[in-house]
Image (cartoon, rainbow, N blue to C red):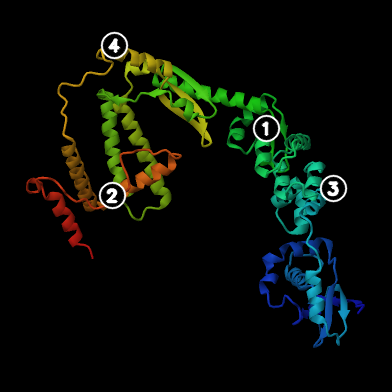
């Protein structure tokens, strides 16, 4: 059956909702936030598609176009919107009053329109800027969205045509196509695409991003932000992107050179301040390589009069800060500021009471690397060749068999006694933990958090989170101290 619907114009105030509209029960569809882009489009471009209406109780009920109707009402209510009042007439098409397929008409309009292809949308945004002379700001105003969202779509629409064609042909996925926008240069995009597809291998977004990293560093990357001023001062090329944070410092070699110079300067400053023998720098701290390095640590020293005076001042200030931190009404910001001050004072006091020995300073050094978005100093490192020399010097005093002579005062315990002592130690610790739950909680959190933050390597093997009850099986039970048993029993008795 073919039916033509007569065109007419209707005042916005004469429009009402139609009960047969298939979206009439979905009130959230017409919420202001869900039609903001439609409202903005109508305000700029007008009503592009007429409403489908039917005469009902003296009004024109909107059978299809409920969201457009809601957007028109929003424009009437918006005092800032120009050209829209209750009397403003809009284009409609009139359905006969005796039509018996009203629900089918409403449903057809909602389900027969295919959603726009994502690539078509990206290219349309790019064409609006390149051909129509629009700016991201005017495009955003037209479609009721943010400038950042528009620029995001524009970036995808400006990807090299060959790559967009591959996405249309489904040779690559849409996500893989989007990954090429990580570098704003179409020429670089094409070169990387050709290199990665040379062997007909399946192309993934991750592979694309990794390949593009070798073609430059984004200014939003922590390294890019750190070196950018020096990079541009040296005339380094920058590939500008619509989104500033996605612009790329194209000369990766120059970026690394500048970074190493900055790291080297930081290492040298630390060497001079602490008195180490050498300083070095590396972009990434290679734990596998550094495993061959030794390490020295500062030892306790007797502070001089001036240092002791400062230590006393720090101690007094720490006592005051501790009292302030116990105030339950303290806001988070104020508490954190106090905590940072305490941390700084404790570090200062530790430095006044510890120092590297002259021998250790003479053979150790400092390496600066880039970690977590900042310069990290690794101090007290001993190079492998210096470690070998030290071990050789110690080896001259070893026994003829190559083994160190045992200490004459060393006590050796029978295996059975050693096991008994381990049990007693475990029981004593268990009792102490039961009596001091705050310390137990701190110890548990320290172990769990430190293990997680240590990148898979346990910070300490001295603590194992394993709660269990110990039972004595000693040979001479009557001679064993019962204190720990009594403490645990007392703790058990006070439980609810």
Q: Quadrant of residue 65?
A: bottom right
Q: Quadrant of residue 346?
A: top left
How far apart are the two marked residues, 1 and 4, measured between alpha carbons? 53 Å
Q: Position of residue 24 (x, y in %)?
A: 71, 77
How far apart are the two marked residues, 2 and 1, measured between alpha carbons? 50 Å
Are the residues tagged 3 and 1 within 8 Å (C-beta)?
Answer: no
Where, quadrant-wise, is the N terminus in this rendering? Answer: bottom right
Q: Position of residue 203 (x, y in %)?
A: 70, 42
Q: Is residue 69 left or right of 309 when viewed as pictured?
A: right
In the image, which disc is placed on residue 440? 2
Q: Is residue 111 above or below residue 294?
A: below
SS at badge 3: loop
Q: Which residue is mark 4?
A: 396
SS at badge 4: loop
Q: Which residue is mark 1?
A: 216
Q: Residue at x 72, y 40 (%)?
A: 201
How far apart are the two marked residues, 3 and 2, measured between alpha carbons? 67 Å
Q: Position of residue 318 (x, y in %)?
A: 30, 40
Upstream in the sequence, badge 3 or badge 1? 3
Can you tell which of label 3 and label 2 is closer to the viewer? Answer: 2
Q: Which residue is mark 3?
A: 133
């Amino acid at each position: 059956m073919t039916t033509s619907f007569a065109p007419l114009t209707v005042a916005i105030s004469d429009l009402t909702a139609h009960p047969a509209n298939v979206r009439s029960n979905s009130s959230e569809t017409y919420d202001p936030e869900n039609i903001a882009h439609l409202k903005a489009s109508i305000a700029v471009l007008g009503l592009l598609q007429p409403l489908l209406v039917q005469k009902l109780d003296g009004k024109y009920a909107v059978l299809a176009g409920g969201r457009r109707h809601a957007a028109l009402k929003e424009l009437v209510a918006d005092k800032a919107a120009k050209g829209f009042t209750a009397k403003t007439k809009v284009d409609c098409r009139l359905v006969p009053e005796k039509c018996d397929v009203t629900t089918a008409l409403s449903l057809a309009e909602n389900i027969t329109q295919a959603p726009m292809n994502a690539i078509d949308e990206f290219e349309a945004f790019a064409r609006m800027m390149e051909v129509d002379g629009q700016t991201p700001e005017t495009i955003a105003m037209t479609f009721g969205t943010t400038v950042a969202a528009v620029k995001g779509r524009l970036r995808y629409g400006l990807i090299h045509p060959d790559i967009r064609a591959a996405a249309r042909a489904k040779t690559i996925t849409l996500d893989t196509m989007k990954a090429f926008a990580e570098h704003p240069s179409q020429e670089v995009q094409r070169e990387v695409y050709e290199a990665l597809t040379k062997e007909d291998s399946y192309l993934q977004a991750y592979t694309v991003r990794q390949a593009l990293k070798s073609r430059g560093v984004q200014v939003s990357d922590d390294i890019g932000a750190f070196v950018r001023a020096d990079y541009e001062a040296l005339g380094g090329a920058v590939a500008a992107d619509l989104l500033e944070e996605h612009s790329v410092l194209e000369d990766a070699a120059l970026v690394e050179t500048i970074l190493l110079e900055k790291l080297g300067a930081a290492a040298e400053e630390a060497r001079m301040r602490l008195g180490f023998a050498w300083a070095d720098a590396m972009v990434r701290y290679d734990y596998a390589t550094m495993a061959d390095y030794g390490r020295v640590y500062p030892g306790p020293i007797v502070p001089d009069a001036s240092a002791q005076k400062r230590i006393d001042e720090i101690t007094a200030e720490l006592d005051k800060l501790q009292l302030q931190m116990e105030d339950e009404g303290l806001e988070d910001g104020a508490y954190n500021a106090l905590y940072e001050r305490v941390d700084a004072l404790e570090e200062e006091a530790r430095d006044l009471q510890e120092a590297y020995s002259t021998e250790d300073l003479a053979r150790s050094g400092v390496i600066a690397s880039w970690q977590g978005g900042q310069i990290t100093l690794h101090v007290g490192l001993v190079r492998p060749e210096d470690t070998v020399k030290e071990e050789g010097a110690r080896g001259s005093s070893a026994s003829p068999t190559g083994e160190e002579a045992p200490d004459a005062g060393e006590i050796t315990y029978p295996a059975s006694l050693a096991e008994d002592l381990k049990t007693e130690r475990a029981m004593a610790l268990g009792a102490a933990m039961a009596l001091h739950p705050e310390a137990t909680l701190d110890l548990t959190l320290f172990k769990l958090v430190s293990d997680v933050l240590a990148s898979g390597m346990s910070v300490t093997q001295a603590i194992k989170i394993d709660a269990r009850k110990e039972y004595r099986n000693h040979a001479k039970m009557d001679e064993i101290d019962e204190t720990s048993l009594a403490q645990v029993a007392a703790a058990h008795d006070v439980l609810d």
